[in-house]
Amino acid sequence: MKGIILHGGHGTRLRPFTYTCPKQLLSIANKPMSRYALDDLIEAGVTDIAIVIGDPFPNKVSEFYGDGKKFGVNVQYIYQKEPRGIAQAIGLCRTFVDDEKFVVYLGDNILKRGIRDYVKQFNRANADALILLSEVKNPSRFGIATLSGSHIKKIVEKPENPDSNLAVIGVYFLSSNIFSIISSLRPSWRGELEITDALQNLMSSGGKVEYDFITGWWKDIGTPEDILDANRFMLDSIQREIGGILESEESVKGHVSIGKNTKIPRNVLVRGPVVIGENCIFESGVIIGPYTSIGNSVKIQQGEIENSIVMDNCEIGTNSRIVDSIIAKSSKIVELGNSLPKRHTFFVGEQSLIRL
C-alpha cells in the first residue's frame, strides 16, 4: 500500500503563523503537525509516500522531509498549483499510485491511536474505499455520512442541515478505481473537487465503500485553539525522559521530557506534562507548565508559562504569566518595566518582537 500526505492549503484561520510557514509544519508537542501523519504511516508499514505540496512555502516542506531517508521512508513530492479540493489533489497522484491500494492522510489531522489496524482491514477487504467516521458536535463543518443499517446511505460535504453527526475524518483508504471517478467530477459550490462527492459517485456507480468508527482521539486542526487542544492531548501521553541536566529533582514534577544540553537550575519549576527541547536556557524563578511545549534553543529569563507552545529560538523576558499562547519561531517578548496586567495571551508569528 502507498501513502499520500496532503500538505497544501493557505491556512487562513491560522494567521499570523501561516504567513511564514505551512500550517502542517506548525509544532505540536515539539513535532510538526504532519509528522504525526508520517509516523502513523510508518507504524502501519507504509513506506512509499507522496507529499502533495502547494503554496505557500513548498520549499519548507521539502527541506524538512527531504527524500524521506532520515525517517526510513521514500518520499516524493507532487505540486498542486492551486488548492482546488482534496479530490483534485488525490487525482494528481495517479501516476504515483499506479494500480495499488493507497491511503490519503490530511496533514492537518491527528489520530491518537494511529491507522495500523485500518490498513490491515482495508488490505483484507474486497472494497473500493474505506472511510473512518467520528461523532462531532458541529457536523456542518465536515463531510458527513448518513448510515442506513450497516450501509452508507449518502455522504455530503458540509451540509447546512445534516442528517447525522458522523464526520468523515481526514484519512481515506482508496483503490485506484477512484481516479476515474475523480476525472469526471465537477466543482462544488466552493469551486473545489470534493472527496465526499467522489465517494458518493463511487457508491452510485456500484463501487463498494466500507466504513469504520475511530476508537481514539481525533483532531482536525484549523484554529490556534485546535493547536492548543492537540498540544494538551499529546502531552498527556509523554513519558518522563531527562536528557538534559537537573540541578535538583525537586525542580521537575510529573511527566516531563527534557532534551540534551538543556539545564534546569535549582530554583526553576517545571510542572508536567511538559516537553522541552535541546539547548534551552532557564533563569532564576521561571515556572513552566503544565501543558506546555518549549522548542529547541529557547531562552526564558523570567516569568511563568502555562498551556502554551513556544517554538524554536525564542526569547522570553517578561515577569508575567503567559497562558493559552502560541509563540512562533525566533520571536522575542521583553518587558520594559511598564505597569501592565500580569497575565497575557499571545498569538505571535515568526521573528516577531513584542515589548511590554
Image (cartoon, rainbow, N blue to C red):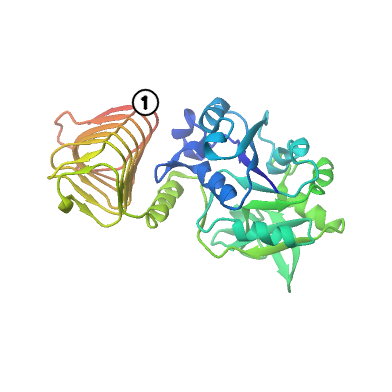
Q: In the image as oriented, which residue stretches furthest toward the right?
A: 205
Relative to the observer, which residue lies in front, 120 or 131?
Answer: 120
The answer to whether residue 108 shows anywhere in this view is: no
Relative to the observer, which residue lies in front, 163 or 65?
Answer: 65
Q: In the image as oriented, which residue stretches furthest toward the bottom?
A: 149
Amino acid type assigned to the residue bearing label 1 in the image = Gln
Q: Which quadrant of the view contains residue 7?
A: top right
**Residue ID for mark 1:** 351
The answer to whether residue 183 shows anywhere in this view is: yes
What residue do we see at 83% from left, 57% from top?
Answer: 207
* 331 on left or right of 23: left
Q: Is residue 348 above or below residue 306?
A: above
What residue do we see at 29% from left, 44% from top?
Answer: 243
Q: How many other residues sit within 10 Å of disc 1, few (<14), some (14-19) or many (≥20)? A: some
What residue do we see at 77% from left, 49% from top?
Answer: 198
Quadrant location, the C terminus: top left
Query: Residue 110 at x, y = what percent?
Result: 52, 51
